[in-house]
Image: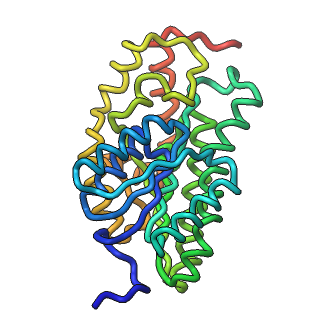
Amino acid sequence: MESSKTIRIFDGATGIVTGGASGIGRALAEELAKRGCEVVLADLQIELAEEVASEIRLSGGKATAVKIEVTDFSAMEQLVQETINRTGRLDYIFNNAGIAIGGNVCHYGIEDWNQIVDVNLRGVINGVQAAYKIMMAQGFGHIVNTASMAGLMVSPGAVAYATTKYGVVGLSLSLRAEAAQMGARVSVLCPGVVRTPILEGMGKYGKMLIDIPPEQMRRMWEKLKPMPPNMFAEKVLNSVASNKAIIIVPSWWKLFWWMNRLSPSLGISLAQRRFQKVQKELGIVQKS
């Protein structure tokens, strides 16, 4: 008989997915449910989250939807505690909610910095802080924090986004080393390009600070061969099951990670050239 003090992969497990109403979060929640995990879809878009949870239940899975603001620690703490009270355990928390703000730094206001740091970094911190002590007490649990390839490579034109994602990578790898002796697992998810709403204009809560026609943006992203979200989620959960520290999907994006690790100066140079080419294609003129 399986011990109640052991993480379940994934059948019979309980997991929370922030940002679970759409995009990567939705795909992860649906795949978790397919594998027998009871999922809590936590999102500000509560109507959409409830639709997704209903579809999961109609397909035979277990899912509930909760409206959450990840920047509110007390709300995150309450979500984790209510999940524990109801199910008796917390095997997984996917701190996935995030936003993107596109544009050059000269276009930012300080409010843009505050918003993206609050959601992308503090939101992850809140999820970790709410779940970590619970997992320590259980003796098991897996925290999966969504960063980005922008947290592993040079990303001009997305400086604020990259700042937060580098922070998530550092948090996750450092916590992984600390948590291992207590039986808890920590992974950081670094997606390449996945076919989600963020490709169509930064998503509902993000924004583009420069005017780019949607069709032009779509063509730009298509060059990077976006992966379908259901395929993405399958590959990610296989890596979570294997307790990988850094999960990069699609896997060919590892080439950029390796290059930036082996030669940071080359990574900067290539990113600079690519950035200048994109600026020219988009007709963006830099102020001198």
Q: Is residue 216 visible?
A: yes
In the image, residue 98 above or below residue 131: above
Left or right of 26 in this view: 79: right
Front position in the image: 67 or 181: 67
Identify which residue is drawn at 58% across, 50% down: 166
Total marks in image: 0
In the image, residue 27 above or below residue 81: above
Residue 104 image position (x, y, % from top left):
62, 24
Identify which residue is drawn at 49% across, 45% down: 19
Identify which residue is drawn at 60% across, 62% down: 171
Residue 6 image position (x, y, % from top left):
40, 83
Left or right of 11 in this view: 164: right
Residue 86 image position (x, y, % from top left):
49, 68
Q: Quadrant of the C terminus?
A: top right
Residue 212 image position (x, y, % from top left):
49, 13
Q: Quadrant of the N terminus?
A: bottom left
In the image, residue 168 above or below residue 210: below
Which residue appears farthest toward the right when viewing the image?
110
Q: Is residue 152 visible?
A: no
Identify which residue is drawn at 47% across, 22% down: 201
